[in-house]
Image (spheres, rainbow, N blue to C red):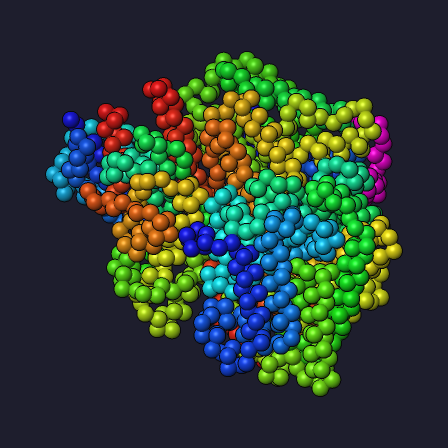
Amino acid sequence: MSIVAGFDVGSLSTKAVIIKNNKLIGTAIIKSSPKPIVSANMVMKKLLDDTGIAQSDIKMATGTGYGREKIDFIDNAISEISCHSKGARWFVPSARTIIDIGGQDCKVIKLDKDGNIKKFITNDKCASGTGRFLDVMAKVMNIDVSELGTISQKSTKPIAFASICTVWAQADVIKHINSRRPVEDICAGINVAMANRVSMLTNAIKVENDICMTGGVAKNKGVVKALSSLLGERIKKLKKADPQLTGAIGAALFAQEKL
Amino acid sequence: MRPELKEYNLDWLFASTFSVAKNLLKSSPGEMEYVYNYIPYVSPLLKPLIETGKPALSFLELFGEYYTNIVNAKENGKKVVMTTFCFDPCIFYAVDNLLPVTLEIGTALTSLAWKRGSADFMDYCTEIGFSETGCSSQRGAMGAYLAGLGAQIDLVALNMGGVCDTNANAYNFAAQYLNVPYYGLDYPSELTTDEVREYHHKDYRNLVHFIESHTNCKFDIDKLREVLEEKRKQDDLMNEIEDMQRLIPNPVPGIFHIMIYAARYTYSGKKKFTEMLKEMVEIVRKNSENGVSGLRNGVEKNRTFLVYIDNYSYGLSLYEWFEKKGISHMGNILSRTFTEAAPYTTGIPGTAYRIDTTNFDTMIDTLADINARMPMTRTIRGSYDAPNMWLDDTLSLAKIYSADSCIYLGTPGCRNTWSNIKLLARDLEAYGYPTFIAYGDSFDSRVETWDMSEMRFEEFYNIRGLL
Amino acid sequence: MEKIFFDAATNIEIPSVQQWKEKGKKVVGYTCSFMPVELFYAADILPIRLRGINAYSMEISDSYYGPFVCSFPKAVIQLAGSGTYHFLDGVVISNGCDTLRRMNDCWRKMGEDIKGTLPSWMYYVDVPHKPDGHAFDWYVNQIKKLIAAIEKQFNVHISEKNLKKAIKVQNKVRKSLWELEKLRRETPLKLTGTEAYSAIIASTMMPVDEYQAHLNAFLKTIHKRKQDVADGKKKLFLGGSICDDFELVSLIEASEAVVVGENICFGIRDENDMVSETDDPIAALTAKYLSASVCPRMMGWYKERSHMIINKVKNIHADGVIMQNIRFCDLHGTENGLLERDFEKYNIPSLRIEREYGPLTETGRLKMRFDAFIEQLKSADINEQKI
């Protein structure tokens, strides 16, 4: 079977994978540049450097993400919703509900038993409920966004935040930092605020098991735990690879099908 | 929605809380303090309420009775009509088998009594398709009723079309979602013309017909007269309080405002409300005679008129902050009755209503006139700078009550006021009234927590040298 | 695409308007689809629909409007404050919704601050929120008052004869627009949604005689076409908030779709959407403009509207529906929620989106959603074939 590639050019990060016969043989995640084509080229270079594979070996490449149409070396572009659905089923073949919290939006996708999209719902408001919200809060806390989940595990009393507007939530966080509230409670509060915003989408679509989370925020244990608690359901962990790669994996699987 | 919220109906929670809470007034201060330890979440609401004395008991009895009746409505063969705060409910009390439930009061009470407020119910509305940007004042209690966590709703009747789209829209959504009959009274932008008066009267007659056809009840003329005469007494008592409020210092305790309008929007025309008002008048009269401020610490540093509504953050935070700062609450748009004898309508023809209980027709016309002059339906129906509209009313009231400053509090869902508050604030400043526009949500502290709101208020009052 | 329609859909002060003004004639802007344009034509005044396209920033309107309001009237105020509407001799504002009616307040205040931005005539019309009974009589009266106001302001007389003539002329345009709509239901489909849309919007921007001539020519052109523009594409129906920014339709059609019908406040509802030419003209205008409304501001009439929309979607054989609302438009935002539920009952796939108005629309975000919706519809096709 031939080698195919999938690219997911997001607002915060760009991801790429190479697969062969449904198996991952190379992955790369980089910070996105303002220009999608630059991001795509950079991630391609990293991927090829890390795997030793030549670009000419890649028989088909599919792109997704907001910058997908700007990538000149891909063969076709498919929406993130389709790619995340496909990718999630690679991780969890029984997945019926996918919660993807990306850098700048949040999507909940419902699949039928065959993995076809039945319905999807997206966050149409603003940064609140997206990865950007966590980024902003982490910056205010002067920690890396990847630490928000770990630090929050020690909390026993999450602080309630103004969660509807990221800017006002930021003011709230600053106030609590200045009041010397425990950092773990602030982190936990941030995660809970995030989960609350996302739960409105999940409740609107009426989740079905198995549920999984994709995207970078799936790595935040605090958000996953809070959301699972709100849903009253277990959220299946994506173990085979970094959940942030889901979109790229889905894109690669589409490329494989096309081939 | 959190599973624990589905254990009890919202109106049942109110019924039991208020019905039980009234017994606290039989306790000694020591006993009460002891009990407060066991009700840490509701005590921030109950404490300042109970401090008012007799009116508190009436208030708790009133709301205990109100919600108990709603909870038991079906069992007692009554229908429940969902309505809004700017619709005088006394007409519903003139029909034997009908009980009104006013959503905004429910949302406010949830905000005041629960730390999380009605956030879960608000989100439920969004989950079932209602716009998240709609006004939060309906969304809280509405979410409970639409989730089946309240009495069964049989019909929806209100006024708001033309004055507040987002309000009317919420009720329209509820009616469609529950698949129950809906009637909305329409309000053109004029207030005082004969043409609009006739329009209101015709519209109201259609409403009467709607109520009769959906309750299979005919209006009892004697009962209607009794309700309206009771309302007349209530208007007189409220006018007396409004009049005394002009004194410096203001003898009216700030908390009286919310108690009065909460009761007015739910129990207009009912004797319990009259009782509470009488008790309040007694207290205010005594304060007036003694030249004493209604503020707890007795020192009035500032008189603030709220140009729109209050903030209903947990535990009466706004009111407590006013008390702490020595700010006399001069009422808001919700406090006003616009009856003919009110201190701010005397001598202005056509803008007020008069209660005429001569016959059925005059009574229906009266009710139509009352509804056209309820808060919001009167003040924000036309251009903000038109006669008898928001600017006119605000300037008159600020002057009559010797206000030092004005505050705008509302919700992000209020398209109407957010579309002209900057204009109003500008004009108020030009007339010499320092005016603060708060960007939070009076019913949803997830938009801006009370701590942040308080910080901003402090900033305003300090910078403008108002304290 | 017909250039003349494209120009009218993408600009405000188009050559037709300039030529009208050069003849010394008057132009009046109006806000809503409730406005009987016939009144103005009967007075030889050009009525143009107030639009907010090409408002790339909001710093002027932000001084008057607060933050939590729909971007459409804000965009109109922005343009007015920038001088775009300098050519207007008057503006008639009606209470389409709370935010729109406050445009009256904001525009007048802005006129005090920015000289030359307030037209010499501002008039407000109270449109009822119900179509019948005393509300019908009220609107008849409002129209009579508006006629009197136009006559006084512009020193004209609006005779019954001229009014009837204006009704006939507009009905002819409506019939032609219905012809256009019928073509959009045919196979092969010979015109894109973007083309149809620009033609529909143009009807509110140029003198009616000129418009009729262009529309007739356009219809002839379409009839001669052979290519099926829907080949390999999904047919979509568009509903929701005011949507005169036809770039949104272009964006949808860039996702392998073609828009074949709308339920928005432009164009005509159906073939019966006419003004009676036999009844009293004012009553006839009231009947059409008030009673045939597609707007959720007519609260309590959701069931009638939803049946009308669902039937339309079925008759058009749309593969799916896109329901959009401008952020903070609670009327459409909420009605879209009810419609989504009802579409589901009829197995009509739908997509609900929220957006800002005009050039402020976040095209990247929306394109992703449109692409995903089309992919969803296509995979449903594949599934059906497998079965």
Does residue C154 show up magenta in the picture? yes
Q: Is residue C348 left or right of residue B97?
A: left
Establish if C38 lies above or below B429: above
The one nearer the camera, A149 or C240, is A149
The magenta region covers C143-165
Find the residue positioned furthest to the right.
B358
Residue C141 visible somewhere in the drawing: yes
Establish if B234 lies above or below A199: below
For the C terminus of chain B, the image quarter is bottom right
Q: Position of residue A27 (x, y in %)?
A: 19, 42
Q: Residue at the location (73% across, 79% down)?
A: B285
Find the residue positioned furthest to the bottom.
B290
Q: Residue at the location (60% across, 53% down)?
A: B72
Q: Is residue C269 left or right of residue A80?
A: right
Q: How many marks?
A: 0
The one nearer the camera, A124 or C152, is A124
Q: Is residue C6 left or right of residue B282?
A: left
The one nearer the camera, B316 or B461, is B316
Residue A253 found in image quarter: top left
Q: Residue at the location (48% across, 49% down)?
A: B124
Find the residue positioned furthest to the left.
A52
Q: Position of residue C49 (x, y in %)?
A: 66, 38
Q: Main secondary structure of the magenta part?
A: helix
